[in-house]
Image: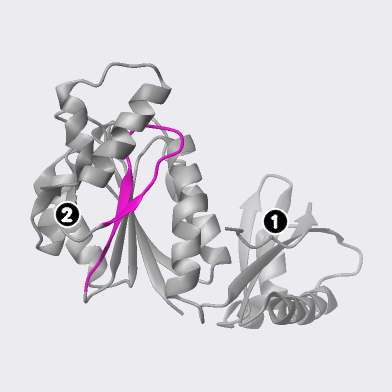
Amino acid sequence: MPHAEIVTIGTELLLGEIVDTNSAYLARHLRDLGLDVYRMTTVGDNPARIAQAVREALARAEVVITTGGLGPTVDDPTRQAIAEAVGRPLVFSEDAWRMVQERYRARQCAVGENARQQAYVPQGARLIPNPVGTAPGFIVETPQGVVITLPGVPREMEAMFTQGVVPYLRERFPQAGVLRVRHLVVHDVPEADIDARIADLEAWSNPTVGLMAKPGRVTLRLAAKAPTAAQAEAMLDDLEDRLRARLDPAWRVTRTPASQEATP
């Protein structure tokens, strides 16, 4: 299965001024596309550190997705950092410039000189239209892997990911398969008591089961990877049967629906 890493960019994240919801969104949707997310990194608005984080991620993963730093201001350095990371010059894209101008006109806003910054991309990059904001994203394919660069504003990132990135990833990794997840919730039972009954099943590699404890309940997260959704669901059914056979019949166990695949 292909591996992915997520790099979120923004000094405001490191200062705790905003909460990173982008990583959670991307991780959920990447897993449904069959891509394993192995690491998430947050880096401030520093071109050298962004470039280093992307280079390191490319050394480990086939897909690197970045969010943030694509605005028109001086403290939006992601374009230059990605160009440095992949060893390509930053070039002005007439197609990107047309996208930017169209978005400004749609908002009935004047196009300032700093808006042109949003039209620079690494040479050879594939553009990702932004139907919500002004800054297009881009995809850079390298011998090591692919870098997908998206804005940090969640509603922009989500729209671009759904409309532009999901179809691209499905085409690039047609054999990635799917990953399905479901939850069993055990109420009012200590985590250690559950672990003692299912420890050997927790060591499985596919399907897998993990425990997440919260006050008054423990959630068993079941996950299965397979070429098709039907095969993954069958694996989850078998694992759920095994788990229920191990748990005390007197315990109250509820099930939440299996996750749905991301749709293009």
Q: Vertically, is 58 above or below 246?
A: above
Task: Identify the mark nearer the N-term, 1 or 2.
Answer: 2
- Mark 1, secondary structure of its residue: strand
Q: Is residue 155 left or right of residue 143?
A: right
Q: What residue would you read off at disc 2?
A: 122
Dot 2, how many residues are within 10 Å of its Cα: few (below 14), some (14-19), or many (20+)? many
Q: Is residue 44 left or right of residue 191?
A: left
Q: Which mark is residue 69?
A: none
Residue 136 among those drawn in magenta: yes
Q: Residue furthest right?
A: 250
Q: Position of residue 18 (x, y in %)?
A: 39, 30
Q: Quadrant of residue 199?
A: bottom right
- Mark 2, secondary structure of its residue: strand
Closest to the observer, 231 or 120: 120
Quadrant in which the C terminus appears = bottom right
Instruction: Identify which amino acid the numbered label 1 is placed on.
Output: Val
Dot in front, 1 or 2: 2
Residue 210 among those drawn in magenta: no
Q: Quadrant of residue 122?
A: bottom left
Closest to the observer, 104 or 239: 104
Tell me whether the residue at label 1 lies in contact with that at label 2, contact meaning CB atoms closer than 8 angstroms.
Answer: no
Q: How many numbered discs sit on the rendered protein? A: 2
Q: CA distance from mark 1 to mark 2?
A: 47 Å
Q: What residue would you read off at disc 1?
A: 218
Instruction: Identify which amino acid the numbered label 2 is placed on.
Output: Pro
Residue located at (19% from left, 38% from top):
45
Q: Vertically, is 120 above or below 109?
A: below
Q: In the image, which residues are magenta? A: 126-142
Dot 1, how many residues are within 10 Å of its Cα: few (below 14), some (14-19), or many (20+)? many
Residue located at (15% from left, 57% from top):
123
Q: Is residue 135 visible?
A: no
